Image: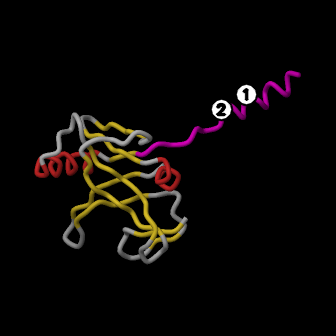
């Protein structure tokens, strides 16, 4: 009985599904872009999603939304909210959204552990 309890405790201690992380650089950039678009942080946010298509089969979709949808998962980073629909969350769970600004590239960078293959553009992947 003691051994079984130890096994159950080990199983219950297994990591839970991860959420989505957004780096401070990305939060700053989202905040600036939301202000330019006239999106209120109190009501709206950044919508992250996945759709079929792209070089590798799936493509990231990123845009602003004026409010969350009924079944969205909502993640808050300071005053910035990120909305993810349930279907997209299956592919985005554990992902880190970063913002990169170098001489060669400027834009959001999707660091996704669920991606088994991605293309050179960085906006499409397969799982």
Residue shown at 28%/41% (left/top)? 67
Residue shown at 76%/29% (left/top)? 8
For mark 1, give the secondary structure.
Answer: helix
Say whether residue 75 is magenta. Answer: no
Q: Position of residue 122 (x, y in %)?
A: 37, 69
- 43 relative to 35, above or below: above
* Residue at mark 1: 9
Q: Nearer the viewer, residue 57 or 123?
A: 57
Label 2, residues with CA under 10 Å away: few <14, some 14-19, many ≥20: few
- 4 relative to 105, above or below: above
Q: Position of residue 72 (x, y in %)?
A: 41, 42
Quadrant of the drawing holding the N terminus = top right
Q: Position of residue 64 (x, y in %)?
A: 25, 51
For mark 2, give the secondary structure.
Answer: loop
Q: Which label was assigned to residue 13?
A: 2
Say whether residue 13 is magenta. Answer: yes
In the figure, residue 41 lies in which quadrant?
top left
For the residues labelled 1 and 2, the Cα–Cα distance comes to 6 Å
- 43 relative to 33, above or below: above
Q: Position of residue 61 (x, y in %)?
A: 35, 61
Residue shown at 40%/47% (left/top)? 84
Magenta region, residue range: 1-20
Q: Are marks 1 and 2 in contact (CB under 8 Å)?
A: yes
Label 1, residues with CA under 10 Å away: few <14, some 14-19, many ≥20: few
Left or right: residue 120 compared with residue 105: right
Quadrant of the drawing holding the C terminus = bottom right
Q: Nearer the viewer, residue 9 or 82?
A: 82
- Residue ranking furthest to the right: 1
Q: Which label was assigned to residue 18?
A: none
């Amino acid at each position: 009985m003691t051994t079984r309890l130890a096994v159950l405790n080990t199983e219950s201690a297994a990591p839970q599904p991860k959420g989505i992380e957004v780096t401070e650089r990305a939060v700053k950039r989202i905040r600036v872009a939301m202000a330019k678009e006239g999106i209120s942080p109190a009501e709206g946010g950044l919508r992250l999603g996945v759709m079929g298509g792209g070089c590798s089969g799936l493509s990231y979709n990123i845009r602003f939304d004026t409010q969350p949808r009924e079944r969205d998962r909502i993640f808050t980073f300071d005053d910035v909210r990120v909305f993810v629909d349930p279907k997209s969350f299956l592919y985005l769970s554990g992902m880190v959204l970063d913002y990169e600004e170098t001489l060669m590239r400027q834009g959001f960078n999707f660091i996704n552990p669920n991606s088994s293959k991605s293309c050179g553009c960085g906006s499409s992947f397969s799982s």
